[in-house]
Amino acid sequence: MISIPTTNESPVVVDHAGPQDRAFPLASVTKLLTTVAVLIAVEERTVTLDEPAGPPGSTIAHLLAHASGLGPDREVLAPPGRRRIYSNSGFDELAAAVSRAAGMAFADYMEEGVLSPLGMHATELRGSAARSAQSCAADLARLASELLQPRLLAPATLADATTVAFGPLDGVLPGFGPQRPNDWGLGFEIRGAKAPHWTGAANSPATFGHFGQSGTFLWVDPVATIACVCLCDLPFGQWAKEAWPALSDQVLRAQRRA
């Protein structure tokens, strides 16, 4: 499915396949929803990017950028800002920080701040803010449209969040191995010069998004002004490493021909 921005309430879907309203587990694509909710909390001054959160010396911004040093099992593996260590627990820390500051459950904050305004009525957070949402393709098209042409977020906020944070830090991209550098913005993985990668060879280095272990992905290419969403019921594996880049390149070729 491909979506491009529009000035009305609904995204323009220029091509799709499969059921658009069937809900699937998002796995780590959940982090995109959490990221938007946290950025809204920053804009509302519920939290600030530089306030302490996570390990000693870490901030909200470090947690968003997987630069806090917090490992997957909540162990501290490095000082903040030194390595890009992918961390589900870091996103759970983010949700807890926003929940405390807002005085409400993070799932409710996400519903009120992100899901309801975007019309994502089939989307629900059921547990971890890192990996426990479920959604459908039609809803994720609405999210993709917001990320192409933001209306909830200020354009400057999104631009900052999709710029590499804390410099060119090395790290491991889950499923694709060590990356030097492993570029990440504030919550958004940035393609940069990573190889191998789950997006296509034709995707611009500015492409940002996320993929999940449930066989899901959402990428936005701001240079091509197009986004692509994939949901399925087949867990991530070798098939995805082969199919996703090829699909992404096909999407971009079709965009150029349109």
Image (tube, helix red, strand yellow):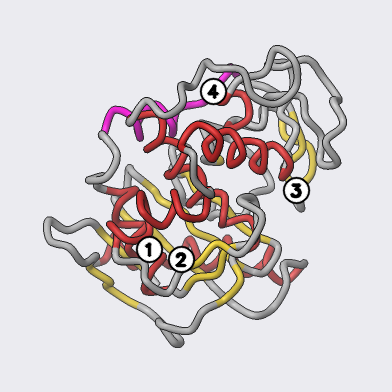
Mark 3 vs mark 1, CA separation in Å: 27 Å
Mark 2 lies on residue? 229
Label at residue 165: 4
**Looking at the image, which residue sits at the far left?**
7
When the figure is inspected, residue 37 is found, relative to residue 27, above or below; the finding is above
Mark 3 lies on residue? 174
Residue 192 position in % (x across, y down): 54, 35
Q: Residue at x 33, y 29 (%)?
A: 43
Q: Residue at x 55, y 24 (%)?
A: 61
Q: Nearer the viewer, mark 3 or mark 1?
A: 3
Quadrant (top left/top right/bottom left/bottom right) for the N terminus: bottom left
81 to the left or right of 177:
left
Name the foreground residue: 249 vs 239.
239
Q: Residue at x 58, y 33 (%)?
A: 97
Q: What amino acid does circle 3 point to?
A: Pro
Residue 247 position in % (x across, y down): 51, 68
Q: What amino acid does circle 2 point to?
A: Val
Mark with earlier residue (3, 1): 3
Tell me, yes or no, whether the two marked residues, 3 and 2, touch with CB atoms within 8 Å. no
Q: Which residues are magenta?
A: 155-167
Residue 217 position in % (x across, y down): 55, 61
Mark 1 lies on residue? 253
